[in-house]
Image (cartoon, rainbow, N blue to C red):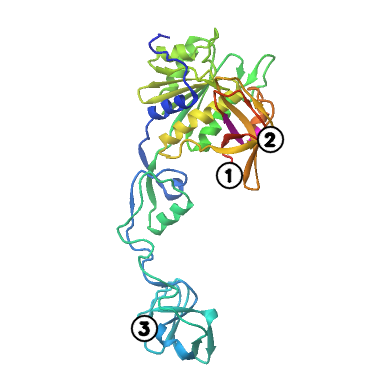
């Protein structure tokens, strides 16, 4: 690899910022309404009509004129309107019309009296309490006005946005397309899933955890298989991976005799932006660009691979999908046991997080060795420990963020 391409080691935040500044939001595609869930709108959505489209009742009850309901006056019921029905009569002075929730308010009506708040006698009703002008009447356009921009491009589509889009009759919607993420594992020691590993071999598990993480974010994983420890295999696989929107590799990016990823990327015209990060675990990772295609080369140890994906690759993919919340927010948690790390490196520590009496408490998830996958399963958060510190005492606050798809605790 040429010296002009190799950059000095980057700090944790600097490395992530470099990656985020290098990637751009992908183009748009039209999808069916339900397929837009979890995606980001690529267009403004304008209301084609008022919502509600017509004045309607918010309650089962009686359409009246508020001024007719004083002093216990009995009002004859002259008609009935169901939801989806059409008013055939108007509320005239001293009369009432039975009405169902969602039914159109008839002419002359200015208030609805709930069915629970009337006395029914013969063919009429008497309001049992004070009737306020306009009560329980949903006015046309009080939620959304015709031609109003109701959803702006860049908004994340949740079930609530789906409801609004359906209210506006949208069968299809333009969203930011999902990135195609090529995933490549490297190493002669690897065997594919379905093959019983021989002595000194291991199953290619990293590719599956990375593919699962890509899919969980909403991307489309493309499994490239394994690049063997020779230049020809690396050239073939990496060239194929550069045809995707993003290329993510696992292992082969350190300084060993068989670590060929950086050499071949350089040969294929990838501009290496940095090739180490001052973080533990995950120091041996690299980032480069081939035109518009980002290349994120992750370490080979399982935990290092998963954590560096979490901290560096995931934010990049989310930004490419149009998400404005691509970096997880940090919040304070109180350590329940002491922690130590190497001074000068940002520490990523797997922790168990609980909320008690309004405070978040954090325990180590277990041994922090980068080959121990079990602690990744035990953890639900990551403590991000500052580089300048070495020791952290029980009772001290540290900054944490939720891990993977963990929900708020």
Q: Please tell me the numbered disc located at residue 408.
A: 1
Left or right: residue 228 versus residue 79 is right
Q: Position of residue 223 (x, y in %)?
A: 51, 27
Q: Which numbered mark, 3 or 1, is in the foreground of this view?
A: 1
In the picture as drawn, the residue positioned furthest to the top comes out as: 257
Q: Earlier in the sequence, mark 3 or mark 2?
A: 3
Q: Position of residue 182 (x, y in %)?
A: 47, 26
Q: Tell me if residue 91 comes above or below residue 284 in the rendering.
A: below
| 38 to the left or right of 29 | right
- Label annotation for residue 90: 3
Tell me if residue 204 can be seen: no
Q: Quadrant of residue 134?
A: bottom left
Helix, strand, or loop for circle 2? Answer: loop
Disc 2 target residue: 336
Disc nearer the start of the sequence (3/1): 3
Q: Residue at x 48, y 74 (%)?
A: 59
The magenta segment:
377-384
């Amino acid at each position: 690899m040429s010296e002009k391409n190799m950059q000095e080691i980057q700090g944790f935040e600097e490395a992530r910022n470099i990656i985020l500044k290098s990637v751009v939001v992908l183009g748009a595609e039209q999808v069916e309404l339900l397929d837009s869930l979890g995606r980001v709108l690529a267009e403004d959505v304008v209301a084609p009509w008022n919502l509600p489209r017509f004045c309607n009742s918010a309650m089962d009850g009686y359409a009246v004129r508020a001024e007719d309901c004083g002093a216990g006056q009995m009002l004859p019921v002259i008609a009935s309107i169901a939801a989806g029905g059409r008013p055939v009569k108007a509320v005239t002075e001293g009369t009432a019309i039975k009405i169902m929730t969602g039914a159109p308010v008839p002419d002359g009506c200015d208030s609805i009296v709930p069915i629970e708040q009337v006395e029914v006698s013969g063919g009429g009703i008497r309001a049992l309490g004070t009737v306020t002008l306009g009560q329980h009447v949903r006015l046309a356009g009080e939620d959304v006005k015709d031609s109003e921009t109701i959803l702006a491009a860049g908004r994340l589509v949740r079930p609530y946005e789906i409801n609004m889009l359906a209210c506006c009759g949208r069968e299809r919607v333009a969203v930011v397309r999902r990135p195609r993420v090529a995933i490549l594992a490297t190493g002669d020691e690897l065997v594919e899933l379905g093959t019983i590993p021989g002595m000194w071999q291991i199953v290619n598990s990293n590719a599956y955890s990375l593919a699962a993480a890509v899919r969980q974010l909403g991307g489309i994983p493309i499994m490239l298989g394994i690049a063997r420890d020779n230049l020809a295999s690396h050239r073939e696989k990496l060239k194929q991976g550069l045809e995707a929107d993003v290329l993510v590799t696992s292992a082969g990016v350190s300084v060993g005799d068989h670590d060929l990823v950086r050499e071949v990327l350089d040969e294929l015209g990838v501009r290496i932006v940095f090739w180490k990060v001052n973080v533990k675990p995950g120091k041996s990772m690299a980032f480069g660009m081939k035109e518009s295609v980002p290349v994120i080369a992750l370490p080979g140890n399982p935990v290092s691979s998963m954590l560096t994906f979490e901290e560096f690759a995931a934010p990049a993919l989310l930004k490419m999908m149009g998400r404005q919340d691509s970096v997880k927010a940090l919040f304070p948690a109180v350590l329940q046991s002491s922690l130590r790390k190497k001074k000068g490196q940002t520490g990523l520590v797997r922790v168990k997080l609980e909320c008690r009496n309004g405070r978040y408490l954090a325990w180590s998830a277990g041994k922090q060795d980068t080959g121990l996958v079990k602690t990744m399963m035990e953890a639900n958060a990551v403590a991000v420990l500052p580089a300048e510190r070495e020791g952290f005492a029980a009772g001290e606050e540290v900054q944490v963020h939720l891990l993977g798809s963990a929900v708020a605790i």
